[in-house]
Image (cartoon, rainbow, N blue to C red):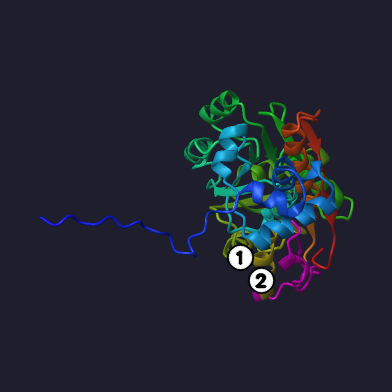
């Protein structure tokens, strides 16, 4: 029986060995640890060094082994961001600013929609299995199971968009009750005694509404009925909300305070369809200071929650915690009532 000859299997030239961190270091004229710092802890190296390393990384098509790095350092360089929805631009500026700042520091971000807390518990369990270095949550309302799980996880947590007396870890945001109170008092001073509400059924919006109603009650002012409609925030909610108000009382209120700019734009559309002039016959105030509101006609008055500043503070709070630096556990980024043509 003929004996089969053995043949060596040579790899094609195109199947070159992967580029290593040592290869990058040699080309950049730095140590491997400097390459690692430039990619994952850029604040520890000079700008010139980081740019030189990144240029070599791009030229050599170096792809760091993130799994190996996380096993060696117990760090994943992953931050999870949980939002009620990704369909509403009201959260966009906070998220974009936070992500930009975290990316500069070498962290990747993972975004997950919670459906206004309905899916937060399930999503949180899945995310913790990926060993994030930090978690950003929207608001301070969480199920007892979520609070217990996060307390035992040992992961830095920032609750954004809200302040409360019982933080999980760090809070960066503002008081929703104070927003409603300032809206009521500001427009009472301008002679708007009949203030109404058109809102979606969102827990943070309900707290703003409660602040407005309590301020009106304290001032002895009459209160129009509030119209609360199911999520999500849409123009349709605004149109249906104002229609419901006017079906209850044909005389338009002095002011309609809306749960978002999107809802407020629907209110303006419904008012126009009924021949009501904004602001002459009806003043409309939104919430969130979105771009659509700024460029609407009439330009929408709104409450700005200082989104870029909030996003910056959210990211900085996490980065300080990662670096084991002193961190405030409650940062009030405030809000601002911006009057434009609609009021």
Q: Residue 299 location in percent, x, y? A: 79, 69
Residue under label 1:
235
Q: What span is colored magenta in the figure?
A: 273-299
Magenta-span inclusion, residue 186: no
Q: Residue 131 location in percent, x, y? A: 55, 36
1 and 2 marks in contact (CB < 8 Å): yes
Side of 63 where 159 appears, left or right: right
Q: Quadrant of the N terminus?
A: bottom left
Instruction: Please tell me which residue is depicted at 67% across the width and 65% down the height of the picture.
Output: 267
Residue under label 2:
269
Q: Residue 127 location in percent, x, y? A: 52, 40
Instruction: Please tell me which residue is depicted at 57% across the width and 65% down the height of the picture.
Output: 236
Q: Residue 24 location in percent, x, y? A: 68, 52
Q: Earlier in the sequence, mark 1 or mark 2?
A: 1
Magenta-span inclusion, residue 298: yes
Task: Say which element carries label 1.
Answer: helix
């Amino acid at each position: 029986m003929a004996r089969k000859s053995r043949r060596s299997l040579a790899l094609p030239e195109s199947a070159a060995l992967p580029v290593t961190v040592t290869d990058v270091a040699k080309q950049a004229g730095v140590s491997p640890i400097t390459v690692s710092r430039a990619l994952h802890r850029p604040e520890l190296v000079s700008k010139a060094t980081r740019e030189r390393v990144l240029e070599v990384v791009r030229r050599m098509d170096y792809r760091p082994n993130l799994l190996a790095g996380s096993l060696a350092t117990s760090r994943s360089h992953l931050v999870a961001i949980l939002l009620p929805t990704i369909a509403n631009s009201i959260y966009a500026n906070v998220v974009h600013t936070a992500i930009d700042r975290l990316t500069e520091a070498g962290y990747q971000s993972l975004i997950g929609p919670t459906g206004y807390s309905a899916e937060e518990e399930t999503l949180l369990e899945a995310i913790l299995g990926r060993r994030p270095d930090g978690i950003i949550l929207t608001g301070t309302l969480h199920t007892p199971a979520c609070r217990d799980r996060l307390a035992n996880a040992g992961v830095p947590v920032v609750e954004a968009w809200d302040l409360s007396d019982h933080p999980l870890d760090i809070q960066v945001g503002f008081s929703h009750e104070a927003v409603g109170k300032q809206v009521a008092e500001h427009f009472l001073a301008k002679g708007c005694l009949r203030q109404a509400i058109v809102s979606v059924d969102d827990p943070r919006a309900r707290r703003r509404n409660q602040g407005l109603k309590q301020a009106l009650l304290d001032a002895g002012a009459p209160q129009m009925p509030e119209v609360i409609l199911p999520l999500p925030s849409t123009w349709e909610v605004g149109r249906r909300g104002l229609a419901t108000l006017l079906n209850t009382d044909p005389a338009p209120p002095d002011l309609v305070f809306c749960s978002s700019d999107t809802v407020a734009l629907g209110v303006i559309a419904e008012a126009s369809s009924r021949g009501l002039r904004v602001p002459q016959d009806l003043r409309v105030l939104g919430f969130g200071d979105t771009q659509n509101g700024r460029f609407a006609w009439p330009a929408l008055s709104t409450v700005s929650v200082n989104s870029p500043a909030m996003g910056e503070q959210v990211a900085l709070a996490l980065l300080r915690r990662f670096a084991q630096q002193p961190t405030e556990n409650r940062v009030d980024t405030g809000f601002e009532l911006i009057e434009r043509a609609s009021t």
